[in-house]
Image (cartoon, rainbow, N blue to C red):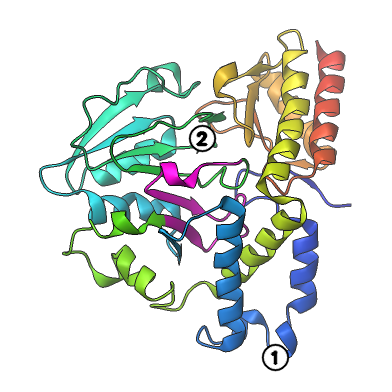
Amino acid sequence: MRAYNFNAGPAAIPLEVLERAQKELVNFNNTGMSVMELSHRSKDYEEVHNRANALLRELLGIPDTYEVLFLQGGASLQFSMIPMNFLQENKTAHYILSGSWSEKALKEAKAFGETRILASSKEENYSRIPTDYSLEDIKDGAYLHITSNNTIFGTQWNEYPTSPIPLIADMSSDILCKEIDVEKFSLIYAGAQKNLGPSGVTVVIVKKDFLETARPNVPTILKYSTHADNNSLYNTPPTFAIYMLSLVLEWVKEQGGVKAIQKVNEEKAGYIYSAIDESEGFYKAHATEDSRSLMNITFTLPNEELTKKFLQEAKERQFIGLAGHRSVGGCRASAYNAVPKESCLALANFMTEFKNKNS
């Protein structure tokens, strides 16, 4: 029996994808080699690379006016690359803070120029997505940065701002979980290790017009244009991670695409949120109802003793990765795309059973 994997990242990968990768591991496409052994300049790998690009474009409806890049360094490198490329002198980068990762992004930007916190829900321990801000006075800004989903706090943007300046989003933990309008954004970035596959590759979707505004005095490897001009093959890419990404994207397509995935995700999260809401206060959600995440469901129990007991009994039943982050405490269930509906239903049932025995 496979574990009920609720890890926050690296996270669950579809079983069908793992089984296919296992089957192809030592002899990919009759080459007599693993995909990990192929030259990144070979025809066999090039097909994998371009297939991943094409599938992502298809699934997200990415127009030809955007580049799709496969980079390394995780989302954390993007925290620096973005201001390094796009925070021009005499301009200000605006940040909406909704959790720890947006704080880290802001910290890196401060090293490259002027920044401003447009809004923040930090004083409420990031229990909601900020709404108390105006876009009227940012018209001369370099860009507006948001984090679409917050793994630690369990909050998610439901509607994105219509920004008068380039909108940039870190979508590491909710890309492909629901339909989005890519054209609202000038740049989207996402580490793969939650919804896209294993760790090792970072997807960047960037508008070509925005690329042209980049500063010229940036090291070659850290220029987005370098990777755009070379089909993300300027240096050796993380070939196995991109191969796994392509398999995950094929799986998403087979499920019916992002629209179908979104419907399943809403059902999955609904099971667990219902267990919380119907517990008569035994479980309490960290996020306010209007900011609840489909991907990361955070909740607390009445006290630390019960929390430890809950986590121990959950572990004995093969529920893995449910401990909450120290910033919030309690528990966190990360129900990414590859987490089966059955896992979420099983967790909801266990939660109800535990509450009935311990309240």
Residue 181 belongs to the span the image colors magenta: yes
- 10 Å crowding of disc 2: few (<14), some (14-19), many (20+): many
Q: Which residue is mark 2?
A: 150
Quadrant in the rendering for residue 72: bottom left
Residue 270 place in picture, x, y as percent? 74, 26
Image quadrant where one finds the C terminus:
top right
Horizontal side of 63 relative to 187 (left or right) equals right
Tell me the kind of residue under disc 2.
Answer: Asn
Query: Which region of the structure is painted magenta?
Result: 179-205
Residue pictured at 86% horizontal, 27% vertical: 349
Residue 176 place in picture, x, y as percent? 60, 47
Circle number at residue 304: none
Residue pictured at 69% horizontal, 24% vertical: 307
Element under disc 2: strand
Which of these two is toward me, 157 or 239?
A: 157
Which of these two is toward me, 89 or 4?
A: 89
Q: CA distance from mark 1 to mark 2?
A: 42 Å
